[in-house]
Amino acid sequence: MAATVPTLSAYGFSSAWGDEVVDFHSNLNPEISSIVKFDGGGMVQEEKPKELFKAIVLFLHESGIYRKDTIIEYIVPSNVPIYQVSLSLIASFISAITVLGVPSEIYVNGASYIIICFAYILAILAANTLFIPVYYNCIKTSIFEYLEGRFNRLVAIFFAVIFVIQTIFYSSLALYGPSLAVSTVENVNIWYILCLIAFLSTIYTSLGGMKIVLWSDTIQALLILIGPIFIIFESAINNHGIINIVEKFNDYKKIPFFKFDLDLTTKNTVWQLIISGTIMYMSMYSSNQCEIQRLMTLRSLKKAKRSLWIIVPLKIIITLTMALCGICVNVYYGNEKLEGKNDQVYIVYVTNMCRVYTVDPIIPSSKPTKNERLTKKKFVRYVRLVNTS
């Protein structure tokens, strides 16, 4: 639904549509409308949530106002830069689950989780060697098209339905992270925030298609990379350097880093992290429609393989920075037993230490996950469940 008022120029934004924008405010629930409210002259400042959160939400929404004319360009745009695909691949699985989960994991179980970085290398090696060449040789934009050609249509539809169901559950978890963050920091009902983020993501993903998902993922992946660095920098200043932080962490957490125990009940052993991590990430980058559709926007197999290799150092950097955030949390609280859920520890820490950065890496991390899964569900329904020709 499009409207001519309010215009983007009134808020300092520009758009490929000029002054034509989506009137998302008129469709919001009255209670949700109090979160982002407009009048004839611009955005009305309200006490909750804070201006920073409102600015992030508005920017991430308006960056998606873009439209393509054809179904082909809407689903699989061509001639997309390698760096853009790589950052989009990063953003799609670096959701709020990761941003909140890794620091909490380090806080509770120690730094041995970092070993999973070795699994990234093995997973990408397997994907580039065994799977990606198959899709390019078959010239398929969907793994479900491949399944239909390799087996039959019933198998393809079966896995398409499973994919849609899995996507719904994963998207729900990804939306929970930023909603929890804002709810904790600003004392806003978690359901209001959840509905707002889901609504904005649905609107501009539906209008922009795959190309705008790639662009928004690129911007938001950079925010996810930069956000934790500011938090680590602030913590280093307060603790007289990163080396001092690591030394304090070793004093608090006497958990061995490398655990070669064969007991399956032992948490975060080397075997668990490398073997299970390799299988998990190999499935993400070799048999997940979300990732395959991104890779197929590149014109050659060589570029697709290069794009996957680029994400390895980026994923390692993100994992290490988020782990270091978890170490900072542990040093800040020491052996103190905190009340509440473990998934709120990182949010509370950032709120206390560096409030200005509280929602910066968390809010953007939910948008790529929601956006690309919406696009893939539309694509799956179009190819497998709607287009029967």
Image (cartoon, grey):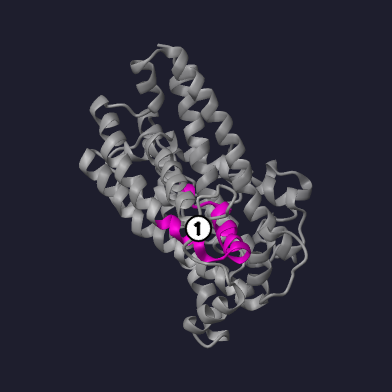
Question: Where are the magenta residues, as a range?
Answer: 92-117
Residue 126: which quarter of the image?
A: top left
Which residue reaches farthest front? 262
Picture coordinates of residue 273 (x, y %)?
47, 52
Residue 331: which quarter of the image?
A: bottom right
Residue type, numbered disc 1? Phe
Residue at the (51%, 70%) spot, across then down: 324
Residue at the (52%, 65%) spot, across then down: 111
Picture coordinates of residue 86 (x, y %)?
35, 50
Q: Nearer the viewer, residue 53 or 311?
A: 311
Image side of residue 231 versus residue 319, left or right: right
Quarter of the image where the C terminus is located: top left
In the picture of the structure, the residue carrying the numbered disc 1 is: 13
> Does residue 288 sit above or below 88 in this rendering?
above
Q: Nearer the viewer, residue 262 or 199?
A: 262
Picture coordinates of residue 326 (x, y %)?
57, 68
> Does residue 236 sit above or below 344 in this rendering?
below
Picture coordinates of residue 221 (x, y %)?
45, 56
